[in-house]
Image (cartoon, rainbow, N blue to C red):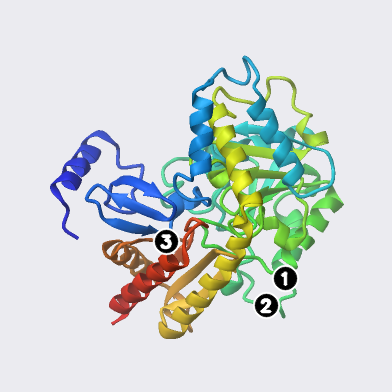
């Protein structure tokens, strides 16, 4: 796609002033965005199936979020919660304490990013249990800081050249049914990937040394890998047997992305600690760690926190987000949206051999591209090309997965049916061009 003089100038400035490390999915530049639409600097309207990588579930510039931010900005922006406290921080903590799964007393602290939330969740788990080890999964993504990069599975681009990594992190196979690490087939596998945790304690790390088991309910960057119904209940049972805490990383899967406020609710499992970020504040930098009060109150005064954590503007934005999700019917809309997207993806799978698997829950759905359905050879180059073709035609989509061959949907939940249909028409057209 030919660039305009404006885009060319901006891109030249980007290349000369910003290092290449921060990647860019598309070559475009945004001018404004509303709902599920982005307008670029040329005035071109683009349908957004990426949502800022799962950050704007309530849509770009939702009026209630914008109004909350503006109202707060007129009052105070940053007194720092550690210096002088303010109500929005406490009010949002109260909300999350009441909304997260579990009928036990809970407490919440705030940070800025998903990685920070995970770091703090691990710190709390280690402090509360006085154990060092953390168990995570293959294909996981938990962030890019030293500890969360260690927890993250994929080497390129996230870990290559950035070692050595944090100690006492142990990784076991994930419940990747399409590519079962045990060579089994669901349901005859009897969810061996969950029961393997007992064997893992023998060959990798002792349970009495393990503080927590951390997992995304649906793995995001790993390819929207979705465990079977039995998986998390069995994992939780084993963890409870040994006093190991279960941390649910809901950074990408939370805030209505699966049709429920928290994805782990689909498994009827109550984690000990939950991390949230991304769509929690609709684009404002905010993350949260919510957990059992008896765990959260263990670290000493001053042991947790950070200068910007729980910024008042971000807290007000998050309060508006929860109101939109819970009171404006957006969770119901998410469930309806999920059914429509699944139907459309299944139809595409029937038409195109390159789509080997369709998976996910609610509107958190993905298609895995393969060069051959029998061998399941990944098709990463084709996925990359598909992303580019869609952008040229006016649709932003994202690839992901350990092999880079998965196309995921993270469109704002406020997307209209007309916009959704138009987006999938573009995807259909791009797939046709890709496979002809």
> Is label 1 in a helix, a strand or a loop?
loop
- Badge 3 crowding class, 10 Å Cα cut-off, few under 14, some 14 to 19, many 20 or more, is many
**If you read the primary sequence from the N terminus, does the residue marked by circle 2 or circle 1 appear first?**
2
Where does the image place residue 242, in percent across and percent down from the top left? 84, 49
Mark 2–mark 1 CB contact (< 8 Å): yes
Where does the image place residue 123, in percent across and percent down from the top left? 68, 34
Along the line of sight, which residue is nearer the eye, 391 or 368? Answer: 391
**If you read the primary sequence from the N terminus, does the residue marked by circle 2 or circle 3 appear first?**
2
Quarter occupied by residue 272: top right
**If you read the primary sequence from the N terminus, does the residue marked by circle 3 or circle 1 appear first?**
1
**Residue drawn at the location 51% of the way across and 62% of the way down:** 223
Q: Is residue 303 above or below residue 367?
A: above
Q: Is residue 44 above or below residue 425?
A: above
Q: Is residue 94 above or below residue 235?
A: above
**Residue drawn at the location 53% of the way across and 21% of the way down:** 75
> Is label 2 in a helix, a strand or a loop?
loop
> Is label 3 in a helix, a strand or a loop?
strand
Q: Which mark is residue 48?
A: none
Quarter occupied by residue 422: bottom left
Looking at the image, the residue that sits furthest to the left is 5
Mark 3–mark 1 CB contact (< 8 Å): no
Residue 285: in sight, yes or no?
no
**Residue located beneath label 2 in the image:** 186
- Badge 1 crowding class, 10 Å Cα cut-off, few under 14, some 14 to 19, many 20 or more, is many
**Residue located beneath label 3 in the image:** 399
**Residue located beneath label 1 in the image:** 191
């Amino acid at each position: 796609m030919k660039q305009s003089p404006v885009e060319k100038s901006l891109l030249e400035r980007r290349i000369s002033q910003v290092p290449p490390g921060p990647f860019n999915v598309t070559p475009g530049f945004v001018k404004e965005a509303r709902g599920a639409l982005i307008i670029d600097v040329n005035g071109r309207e683009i349908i957004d199936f990426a949502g800022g990588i799962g950050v704007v579930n309530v849509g770009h510039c939702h009026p209630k979020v914008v109004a909350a931010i503006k109202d707060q900005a007129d009052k105070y922006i940053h007194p720092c919660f550690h210096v002088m406290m303010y109500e929005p921080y406490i009010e949002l903590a109260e909300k999350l304490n009441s909304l997260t799964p579990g009928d036990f007393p809970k407490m919440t602290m705030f940070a800025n990013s998903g990685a920070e939330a995970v770091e703090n969740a691990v710190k709390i788990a280690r402090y509360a249990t006085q154990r060092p080890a953390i168990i995570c999964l293959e294909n996981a993504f938990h962030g890019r800081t030293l500890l969360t990069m260690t927890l993250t599975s994929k080497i390129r681009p996230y870990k290559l050249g950035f070692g050595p990594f944090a100690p006492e992190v142990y990784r076991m196979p994930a419940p990747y049914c399409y590519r079962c690490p045990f060579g089994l087939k669901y349901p005859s596998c009897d969810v061996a990937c969950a029961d393997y945790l007992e064997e893992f304690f023998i060959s990798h790390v002792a349970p009495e040394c393990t503080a927590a088991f951390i997992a995304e309910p649906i793995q995001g960057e790993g390819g929207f890998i979705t465990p079977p119904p039995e998986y998390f209940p069995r994992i939780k049972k084993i963890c409870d047997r040994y006093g190991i805490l279960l941390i649910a990383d809901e950074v990408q899967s939370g805030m209505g992305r699966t049709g429920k406020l928290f994805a782990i609710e689909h498994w009827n499992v109550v984690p000990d600690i939950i991390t949230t970020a991304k769509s929690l504040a609709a684009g404002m930098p905010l993350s949260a760690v919510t957990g059992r009060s008896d765990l959260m109150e263990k670290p000493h005064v001053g042991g947790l926190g950070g200068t910007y954590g729980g910024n008042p503007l971000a807290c007000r934005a998050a309060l508006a987000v929860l109101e939109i999700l819970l009171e404006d019917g957006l969770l119901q809309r998410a469930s309806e949206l999920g059914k429509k997207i699944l139907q459309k993806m299944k139809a595409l799978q029937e038409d195109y051999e390159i789509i080997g698997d369709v998976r996910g829950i609610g509107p958190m759905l993905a298609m895995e591209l393969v060069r051959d359905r029998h061998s399941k050879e990944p098709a990463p180059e084709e996925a990359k090309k598909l992303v580019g073709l869609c952008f040229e035609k006016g649709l932003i989509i994202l690839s992901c997965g350990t092999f880079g061959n998965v196309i995921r949907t993270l469109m704002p939940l406020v997307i209209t049916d007309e916009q959704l249909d138009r987006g999938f028409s573009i995807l259909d057209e791009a797939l046709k061009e890709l496979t002809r």
